[in-house]
Amino acid sequence: MIIKDIEDGLAALDHQHLRRHRRVIDTPVGPRMTADGKPLLAFCSNDYLGLAHHPEIVEALCAGARRWGAGSGASHLVSGHLRPHDALEERIAEFVGLPRALTFSTGYMANLAVAPALVGRGDAVFADRLNHASLIDAALASGAEHKRYAHNDIAALEKLLRESAAKRKLILTDAVFSMDGDLADLPRLFELAEQYDTWLVVDDAHGFGVLGEHGSGCLSHFGLPVSPRIVYVGTFGKAAGVAGAFVAGDTRVIEWLMQKARTYIFTTAAAPALSCALLKSLELIADGDDRRKKLAALIARLRDGVGALAADRGWHLADSPTPIQPVIVGDNKAALALSAALEQQGFWVPAIRPPTVPMGSARLRLTLSASNESADIDALLAALHASA
Ligand SMILES: *Cc1c(COP(=O)(O)O)cnc(C)c1O
């Protein structure tokens, strides 16, 4: 029976302790969540600005549903592109300082749109080895050669570019790496993109809302110029606290995506009320310097405390300036044990193991939010101390 393969596959996952489980959460997203009935202080969401349960966004969502209904009824190119969708596109392009934007239902779909629309067979994608899974899938879906360089190794990238005979080239990178919290060297990548006449596609899922002027993201953070070769992807499910994503860039590039991107064309447009909620979220992001300041203070407090402890325990606190603060333990079992010890004390900090991260670099992936208080950080530090 064909089902036997599945049974064997599941058994193998169990055997390797790789079967994944979900927890059911009975509270809104926030620092305090009840997971499988257990109240925990959570350091695991990507709700970096604490907007996921913001009352003004919730109200905008409700008002949007009352005004525009629940569903969009069709894809954007048929009859599903409603006024709020259009307003969101305009607003997001303006906010990130690029000529035009296109919205998508998820960041995964936005990423799958871009590389395959820009390159194909006979071309090459140059990708950081730690890129997000959606960028890997996008590179593969494009049919272009997928050349991967060691994490942030600009010299290795340059060598690949120099030696490549591909017709068209595309550099593909996370702006903030999701398991490490560090940044891509976008200025250097842009220089290489200019020098070798390549596209530069930047996925800023974790930087948008957090970094740059008024939270406008990594291009602003690094002061990159507007260039037709830069294609910028941001997502709305993390700092923006809602759902969805956008691609922003040159007017012609966005027009081309609208014509070619299968994950744009062949899917029902997101609920218009989500655009209403996002317009409110963008307002709060733009006005959110206080939230970002508070977040930066929390990050500094955590780094101070964990830094001192890490040396003692043989952990490595990754060099991250973002709300993603990985504590690299190394051994899979040790990382799981530490996560379990924290949970016993009422803290939810996920352990991340290979293959999500490289062998021997199992870690706690701590994330912070502006909705945390410094007492939360202190409590976590005390729990880390107690979990020998
Ligand atoms: C979360 C994430 C995505 C996917 O975005 P969704 O909107 O959740 O589909 C893409 N890229 C990176 C780097 C991410 O962290």
Image (cartoon, rainbow, N blue to C red):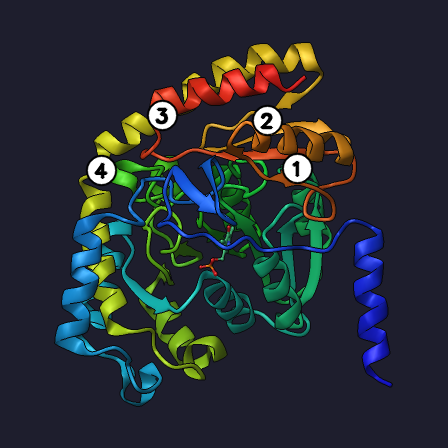
Report the quarter where the C terminus lies. top right
| Residue 120 in the image: above or below residue 379 | below
Cα separation between marks 3 and 2: 16 Å
Task: State the residue at coordinates (51%, 18%).
Answer: 381
Question: What amino acid is at disc 4?
Answer: Gly
Q: Secondary structure at mark 4?
A: loop
> Contact (CB < 8 A) between labels 3 and 2?
no
Task: State the residue at coordinates (24%, 38%).
Answer: 214
Q: Earlier in the sequence, mark 2 or mark 4?
A: 4
Q: Which residue is mark 3?
A: 296
Q: Earlier in the sequence, mark 3 or mark 1?
A: 1
Task: State the residue at coordinates (69%, 42%).
Answer: 357
Cα separation between marks 1 and 4: 33 Å
Q: Nearer the viewer's eye, disc 3 or disc 1?
A: 3
Q: Which mark is residue 318?
A: 2
Q: Earlier in the sequence, mark 1 or mark 4?
A: 1
Q: Secondary structure at mark 3?
A: helix
Question: What amino acid is at disc 3?
Answer: Ala
> Contact (CB < 8 A) between labels 2 and 4?
no
Q: Earlier in the sequence, mark 3 or mark 4?
A: 4
Cα separation between marks 2 and 4: 26 Å
Q: Secondary structure at mark 2?
A: loop
Q: Earlier in the sequence, mark 3 or mark 2?
A: 3
Q: Secondary structure at mark 1?
A: loop
Cα separation between marks 2 and 1: 17 Å
Residue 338: give x, y in percent of width and height: 66, 28
Report the quarter where the N terminus lies. bottom right
In the displayed image of the protein, which residue is found farthest to the front?
A: 37
